[in-house]
């Protein structure tokens, strides 16, 4: 499933959710269902994609209006007007499936390459502008700020053959078994047309696709390679439906042939999934390499060929070395980009200045101060990956809009003057990594008058200790079901002085906070604190205190 794009970007890519619907521009890399899921429910104008992708999308979502789409061709550039500043976008071939493209965005948010699903090859990368490609061990003249990368197979060490080599394996497998009366090709996925074309041309025979049983595949082939289709159901070459019932159907075909004392049909599945699942179970690297160089038959009688439409780990590492981006974000949440060697070596411990595009990406605006040199350290690629791969709108890691002078913000001062900013977890306040509990006292006396405005609670230059006390105060307000955003106390609290000792840990989840509590902190440009895990103890302590608020 594709990821949501960061808050600071005015566009979404391959994401169709209530959160992405708020974006002003939408981009679709290709027509596979996992990248268009939800497009009919959360559609918003405009959608940029290739003409072929748009045509294929109408097959799955005929209710969509053609006017929603704006066609962009491979190699074509567009300048898009936006209230936050115009930006340009250029489409490049993604080497994935018919109509699939990568998007190169350039604007005040930086230079961003979004690969969508891709198989990065030298031919594929050479289509990019030369200034983004390194030469002879040197970095490119213009480095990409971010690459949103397809890391589907990034965690596997399996070396995958090229598409051309895999197709030759399919053809060789058929040549070696001339007695097979029928050849079933499990190639019903968009992006496997090249296999069918080469098989048809090599053996001089058209391929039958059952229109009734596999209408999507038949329709896609009529748009891409109609010349190879056959209407004859007795044709030797036929498209076989893939998962989820591949082995069940294969077993039935083989059993039927044996029962009739006929030669067995040849069933070939060109896919990398079977090899990836088997990758970690094989201890011998040489054995794994040998198995990807020729077709392999499994225990069910299905012949497998390692044909991949996604880059291998080796190809990803090579591409990143060539592009040398500043930051890398995985578009596949199940496989993070931080598992790649390039990311571990080159994307950590980055020194960030106030004009770094990262702040715009996360919708954090830092105003330069004429009296101080703002250079912020501590935001590395690791937390970047964790933030940007959140797939829900109510993520724990919500960026905070910051428009105040950075020298007046908690932990946003230069490293020499305060703790580094990391924007995540306990490190947001420069707290130590130890798990020791802290105790704070809250003293309320009869001479202490409540503030007339909740915003008066927060001083402009809070220390860590003051922040802890503030957090406990606000949490106690919540327990008493008081809307802290509208508290306007006119009378003093009870005469009796109460001192409460509260034990808590600064870690946890912000999901339990109500919106008023979030607004209180954000109105003062302070990161929303983590809730107290010892909420039950806090409630019990509050009951003993019997503190009352009068309005």
Image (cartoon, grey):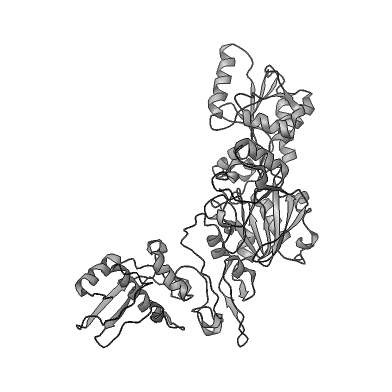
Query: In this picture, is 367 found above or below 11?
Result: below
The reply to whether residue 324 is in sight is no
Which residue sits at x=55%, y=75%?
403
Vertical side of 183 occupied by 372: above or below: below
Q: Nearer the viewer, residue 86 or 490?
A: 490
Left or right of residue 467, residue 352 in this image? right
Task: Give the residue furthest to the top.
Answer: 260
Of the 4 image quadrants, the one containing the C terminus is bottom left
Q: Is residue 419 above or below residue 158?
A: below
- Name the residue at 75% across, 56% down: 78
Above or below 507: residue 77: above
Tally of numbered tags: 0
Q: Position of residue 193 (x, y in %)?
A: 71, 34
Q: Is residue 466 visible?
A: yes
Instruction: Place residue 356 in its image quadrant.
Output: bottom right
Between 204 and 99, the residue placed more toward the observer is 99
Q: In the rendering, at what x and y percent does residue 270 appear?
A: 65, 34
Q: Residue 144: image x %, image y %?
A: 70, 63
**432 left or right of 334 in image:** left
Q: Which of the 4 image quadrants contains residue 12?
A: bottom right
């Amino acid at each position: 499933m594709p990821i949501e794009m960061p808050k600071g970007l005015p566009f979404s890519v391959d994401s169709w959710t209530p959160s992405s619907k708020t974006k002003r521009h939408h981009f679709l890399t290709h027509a596979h269902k996992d990248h268009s899921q939800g497009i009919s429910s959360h559609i918003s104008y405009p959608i940029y994609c290739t003409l072929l992708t748009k045509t294929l999308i109408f097959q799955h979502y005929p209710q969509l209006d053609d006017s929603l789409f704006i066609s962009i061709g491979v190699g074509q550039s567009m300048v898009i007007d936006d209230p936050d500043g115009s930006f340009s976008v250029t489409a490049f071939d993604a080497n994935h499936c018919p109509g699939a493209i990568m998007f190169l965005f350039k604007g005040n948010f930086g230079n961003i390459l979004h690969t969508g699903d891709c198989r990065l090859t030298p031919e594929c990368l050479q289509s990019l502008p030369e200034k983004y490609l390194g030469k002879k061990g040197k970095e490119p003249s213009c480095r990409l700020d971010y690459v949103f990368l397809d890391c589907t197979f990034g965690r596997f060490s399996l070396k995958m053959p090229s598409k051309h080599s895999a197709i030759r394996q399919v053809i060789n497998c058929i040549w070696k078994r001339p007695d097979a009366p029928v050849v079933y090709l499990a190639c019903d996925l968009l992006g496997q047309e090249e296999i069918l074309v080469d098989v048809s041309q090599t053996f001089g025979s058209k391929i039958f696709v059952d229109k009734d049983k596999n209408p999507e595949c038949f329709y896609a082939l009529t748009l891409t390679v109609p010349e190879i289709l056959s209407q004859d159901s007795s044709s030797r070459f036929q498209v076989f439906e893939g998962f989820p019932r591949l082995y069940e159907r294969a077993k039935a075909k083989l059993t039927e042939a044996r029962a009739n004392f006929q030669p067995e049909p040849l069933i070939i599945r060109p896919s990398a999934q079977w090899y990836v699942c088997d990758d970690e179970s094989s201890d011998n690297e040489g054995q794994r390499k040998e198995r990807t160089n020729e077709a392999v038959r499994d225990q069910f009688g299905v012949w497998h060929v390692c044909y991949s439409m996604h880059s291998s780990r080796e190809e990803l590492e090579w591409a990143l070395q060539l592009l040398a981006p500043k930051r890398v974000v995985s578009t596949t949440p199940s496989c993070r980009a931080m598992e790649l060697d390039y990311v571990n070596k080159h994307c950590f411990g980055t020194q960030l200045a106030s004009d770094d595009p990262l702040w715009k990406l996360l919708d954090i605006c830092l105003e330069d101060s004429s009296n101080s040199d703002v250079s912020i350290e501590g935001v590395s690629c690791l937390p970047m990956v964790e933030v940007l791969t959140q797939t829900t709108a109510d993520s724990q890691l919500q960026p905070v809009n910051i428009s105040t002078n950075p020298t007046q913000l908690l932990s946003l001062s230069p490293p020499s003057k305060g703790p580094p900013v990391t924007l995540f977890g306990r490190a947001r306040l420069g707290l130590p990594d130890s798990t020791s509990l802290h105790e704070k006292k809250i003293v309320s006396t009869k001479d202490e008058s409540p503030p007339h405005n909740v915003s008066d609670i927060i001083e402009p230059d809070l220390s860590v200790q003051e922040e802890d006390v503030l957090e406990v105060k606000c949490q106690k307000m919540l327990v008493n079901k008081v809307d802290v955003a509208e508290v306007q106390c006119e009378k003093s609290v009870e005469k009796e002085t109460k001192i409460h000792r509260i034990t808590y840990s600064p870690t946890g989840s912000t999901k339990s906070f109500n919106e008023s509590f979030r607004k209180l902190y954000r109105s003062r440009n302070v990161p929303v604190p983590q809730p107290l895990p010892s909420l039950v103890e806090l409630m019990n302590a509050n009951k003993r205190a019997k503190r009352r608020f009068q309005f």
